[in-house]
Amino acid sequence: MRHSRTRSKRSTASSRVRRSGLSGAAALLGVAALVISAVPAGAATAGTAPPDPGGLIAGQQTATPALVDGIREQAPSAATPAGAARAYLATRTDRYRIAHPDRDLIPAGTDTSGGQETVRLRQTHHGVPVLGGEYVVRMEKKDGRRIVTGTSGKYFTGLRTGTSAAVDDALAVERAVDAVRNELGARAFSGAGEEDESALTGTSRGLVVLPTGTGVLTRHITVRGKDPAHGEPVLREVYIDAQAGYPVLQYSGVQTFGTAGTTVRGSTARRLTDEPAPGTASGSGVKLDGTTVELNIVHDDTRDAYVLRDHARIQSKPDNVLATWDARGRWASELSGTWPEDLKEFSSPTPGFGTEATESGAVDAHWAAGQVYDYYRTKHGRDSLDGHGMTVNSLVGATDYGQPYVNAFWDGRKMVYGSGDDEYRPLSAALDVVGHEMTHGVIEHSAGLVYAGQSGAMNEAIADYFGNAIEADAYRLPMADPDSGLMGQTLCRTRSPRECAIRDLNDGRTTAGSFLGVGFGTDNGGVHLNSTIFAGALWDIREDLGPDLADKVVYSALTQYLTPLDGFTQGRDAVIAAAKALKVGGKNLTAVQRAFNAHGIVPHWELALGVDSDLLLERVNTSNSHLGAGGGWWAAAKSDEAGAEPYSVWAGRTDGKGQLKLMSPNDGRYHVNPATDGRTVVWQAYGTTGVDILARPLAGGPVKTLWHGRSVGSSLGVDGDVVAFAYNNYGGRAGVGYLSLKDPTDVVTTGGGTYHRATFPSVSNGKVVYQDRRRVSAVYETTTRIVDVATGEDRVIQQAAPGTGLGPTAVTGDHVYWLLDEVAQNGTTALRRAGLDGSGIADLSPESGPEALNVSDLTVSGQAVTMVARKPLPQLSNDSLSKLWQFAPADKGDGPRRSRVSCNRGEQLSAAAADGTQVIWLDATTGVSDVVTRTRPAGTCG
């Protein structure tokens, strides 16, 4: 036997900061190449660059330079800055290799300041937007003439994909919602909550080209709603291949202070009331630290009350304001990406706002928003978050499904601050948190750094940097203070600042010693996990150059150099170029370069990351596909080097010998989630008409279609003549089926109904094990069940207690294994074992106690059980990432011996047991997804 496995259980580690509206246990986005640099660059068109014009950095896998610096070249005369920029690029095709700037570059905004013009141009491919394709042209304007001083960004010269879609909006929305629902369902074990089939909706955003290789045409779908099982807010950006209908990219859509998501650019700035703007009054309130502060407020005649609405600051647009709204008791899911119609500004009968405004964090939020606005206005000449006087809305008092919410986020339209809990004050109580969230808005309206992978970590780093800088300036905190780099250190009621802090910009982390390779399913590819590597370099620069100069350098890099898909190395180049443009030289310029060197941010730093495992298949470049192993063979889905081709299924020997075998046809479909028993490989194939389960003997022969349906889960297994699989009917109603390879027309199914669901099948030795949830006499019963394929007997191994979540299963010739969550919200799960007759039930990995883990997946051989599990730590770190744990389950006097399979630093997922103690898995340590193996455990990894 051997079968690929479905992951999961959401991390529920108390109502602390990492329990955000954006769960850190989101679906694994392929542990793919996207991990390292958001989205891999398009393939290059060969060509020779002209001589270095002063400072030219070549683009990666594109013929267009990533950065050109130190030039002074006249731009053609034009009526607008964008017209001049495009005309200039057209005259220098020898350098920039952009054949038709007037056709393929769309003006995206111009920033002007002191005679400087920064023009952003967004790339299109035959009229279709290119994700992250953005080029920047910097010019000086004097006496009617424009001089180009530099360029930077990403223009993908290798795009060749067609722009005619075979998948329509309706199918793309259906597949996107299914993908999100499957991922959420995997995180919440079956039975863990009541399902709400209407909880998720999808909205098409149109066609988008992903710039991988020659390009992948996709339909961009935004999925909103709430987790059907737990009610947590959901905002996902999903990209569906427009030819085959497979979800090739998915990331979360809310930018949080704690753990993580992303936003759609181009939010609307408007005043959310219809009444005329009243005059500004002077009010006051007490912050949570006991300080009384002045507040700009107005008297709202319609309510006969004073409200937290500041008309004094934004002068460029008289109707636009800084407003603070009362969201107490509202769920974050109500507030993420939406605006409740009955939401009201925080009010008071007198100009002196009282206890409610203090304890909710409203006074802090309103005062702090003004401080952040003033910082950007006075220090950088920026008028509000978008630079054009947009309204700034702050919502306070949000809850997590009615429970305390200890996080804050920017959703592209507004800031939302959590209620806090017994230890953490409302999140608006920290000026650096408010500065951080509002800076996400500044980033969105300038560089637009995609909130995933390295670009997302830089997004977080820059938000931390300016949040910290704003607080340090407002309170006159010296950089020499050992606590000056702490973030969120003032939030706690009883803990010391260092114990309370969420991050420390002065933590000394480096790429070589600290970078954590993870999939998009964990922290959106490490946006928080890896942020202080880059933020630490910026913090060092602030210490060496002094606050004023450093802030100008970083702000210039953000607004004039960086573009959406830039990673750490491009961030380094942007900051150094910005410093040079601001006349930073000598020892100060050396200090800037030294800061990045000290944190390991140097060209090709990724190559220095080491592993203790053996490589079987490099750079699979896939999303949401698992591995299979058995009978001396393994199987995996793989794309091409650039990740642009539909996925194919390959098989190889577990000892690494011999040639790989291509199992799937090259037919334009996505072939994923393979399983093998060493004789046959089975897998799923996604196309425009549905999903097929296919099979092919390893010895050779034709591909055979076993089953066709609208949607499948990722659980799929084969053992001899029996294939077991998970499927979904409309509305995500999960079912389990099994069939014979000899006669696949005779399919036995269970579940898939409104009141009956079946999940997580596994197969071995003529037995199928699965989890069952059905309504019996108005009460849901959840059971672990086993089917004897030969006789059809279907019986219960164990009935779970009410409210228990049941997860992935595995079966051998002697035992049944399964995961379960009996204690809701405790952040751990149990691995349970029983005999095939239900006898001898015991927990091999308990749900409580010092050894408890959050086990999300399992795979077994005849000699060992391997778990994919996280330690239930309060904050994400290497120790809390998914790792492989293994023990021999045989009964012994001293109990099972548990060991780590590998000490690799990155995320370890999709384990598939081979013979003995050997395990195959997807490893993200190097920042790309590799298929690796070890034949024996590494030990304790102490």
Image (tube, rainbow, N blue to C red):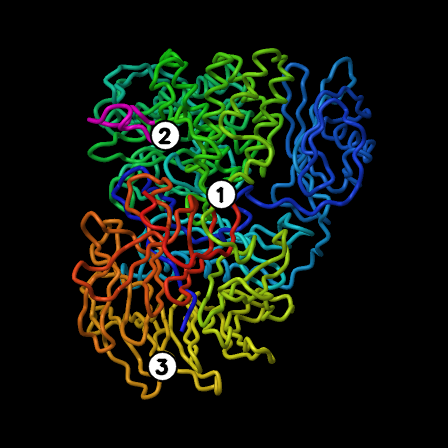
The location of residue 896, given as percent across then percent down, is 23, 59
Q: Disc 2 to disc 3, how far (Cα)?
A: 52 Å
Circle 1 SS class: loop
Q: How much space separates mark 3 and mark 1, taking CA atoms?
A: 41 Å
- Residue at image mark 3: 766
Q: Residue at x 28, y 81 (%)?
A: 794
Mark toward the start of the polypeptide (2 vs 1): 2
Within-10-Å neighbours for mark 2: few <14, some 14–19, many 20+: many
Amino acid at pointer 2: Arg
Q: Which residue is mark 2?
A: 503
The residue at the point 28 percent across, 46 percent down is: 872
Residue range (magenta):
488-503
Residue 339 picture location, percent across and down: 41, 41
Q: Are marks 3 and 1 in contact (CB under 8 Å)?
A: no
Relative to 884, is 708 above or below? below
Q: Who is closer to the viewer here, 653 or 744?
A: 653
Residue at 52 percent across and 65 percent down: it is 672
What residue would you read off at disc 1? 610
- SS category of the residue bearing label 2: strand
